[in-house]
DNA sequence: AAAAAAGGTCTCTAATTGAGACTTATACCC
DNA sequence: GGGTATAAGTCTCAATTAGAGACCTTTTTT
């Protein structure tokens, strides 16, 4: 919808950042990745191996599990450790940074659990119309 | 990755819910919708009209703006009001439910702003390797 | 008379995701 | 010994989703 830029946008540009590299968006993209938060939540209980994570999140594909874990590793939220077993196994665990994300994330989850009835009700009304 | 189900999953099923209708996932999907949170954040400053929102979020397409607003409306987070001007205009505003979401959302944003330097650093290390 | 603006919808294309086969080496089972 | 399973992925192909932008209707502005 690129059109006439708004003032806020101009301010941002003046400060040297595009909507894309705004820090807010970057985290939101993370939460937005849909699987990454779920993975972090699984790892909250302790380190897990690749296939264990897959079993805990039964509707994720291997492809997305791999990719989400790489993203989290790249951002320093998750640590990957290879064990020299036969066959080699890999454990994933939260870093301090990853753990620090759980606070805000639980804020969202608590909100979700508390407000879900209202949301369901709103959906009922909307869908009936 | 459907395979041998895990105990937690069994418990969930016993309680009657699939991974899909878990409340946590539903909110996460919302945040995960990528645009919805950004829209809510724009509406925090007050009601906005369709095109104004589009201008504030210059990289959203009309298609996704419409769809995201409908989703938010359906979930009772945003209210849509049509004014009988020529041509008719439409204003979107936060409902109480929508406003209540901002607290947890800002928790996430504050985390983002505080931890972004660490994330950037981790990315640098990862990408160099 | 032409163009713009309001709030969308519609189509077509591009990007992302999911499903599932395949890999390589070792261990367990009969 | 032979068949099968497991580890953690990778790869390909199909399906879903998102983005770009034309188009719509009515009225005001230039």
Image (cartoon, coloured by chain):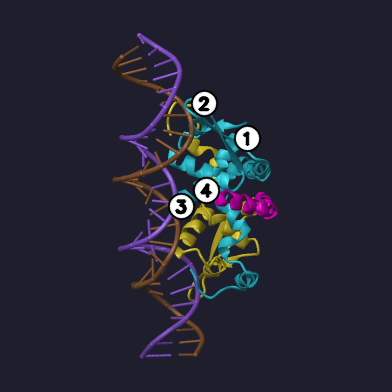
Chain colours: A cyan, B yellow, C purple, D brown
- Please tell me how crowded label 3 is: few (under 14), some (14-19), or many (20+) other residues with Cα within 10 Å: few
Query: Circle 4 sits on which residue?
Result: A33
Earlier residue among tags 4 and 1: 4
- Regarding residue B95, the answer to whether it shows in the image is yes
Q: CA distance from mark 4 to mark 3?
A: 32 Å
Q: Give the number of the disc on residue A85.
A: 2
Query: Circle 3 sits on which residue?
Result: A129
Co-location on one chain, circles 3 and 1: yes
- SS for callout 1: loop
- Please tell me how crowded label 4 is: few (under 14), some (14-19), or many (20+) other residues with Cα within 10 Å: many
Earlier residue among tags 2 and 3: 2
Query: Circle 1 sits on which residue?
Result: A44
Earlier residue among tags 4 and 2: 4
Q: CA distance from mark 4 to mark 2?
A: 32 Å
Residue plotted at (43% across, 41% down): A63
Quarter assignment of residue A115:
top right
- Chain bearing mark 1: A
- SS for callout 2: loop
- Chain bearing mark 2: A
Q: CA distance from mark 4 to mark 1?
A: 18 Å
Earlier residue among tags 3 and 1: 1
| Stretch of the chain drawn in magenta | B102-129
Marks 3,1: beta carbons within 8 A? no
């Amino acid at each position: 919808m690129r059109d006439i830029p708004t003032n806020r946008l101009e301010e941002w540009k003046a400060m040297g950042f595009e909507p894309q590299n705004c820090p807010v968006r970057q985290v939101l993209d993370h939460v937005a990745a849909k699987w990454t938060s779920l993975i972090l939540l699984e790892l909250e209980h302790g380190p897990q191996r690749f296939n264990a994570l897959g079993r805990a999140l039964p509707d994720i594909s291997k492809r997305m599990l791999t990719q989400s874990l790489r993203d989290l590793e790249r951002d320093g939220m998750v640590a990957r450790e290879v064990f020299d077993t036969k066959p080699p196994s890999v454990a994933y665990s939260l870093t301090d940074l990853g753990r620090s994300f759980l606070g805000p994330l639980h804020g969202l989850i608590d909100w979700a659990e508390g407000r879900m009835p209202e949301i369901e009700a709103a959906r009922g009304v909307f869908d009936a119309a």
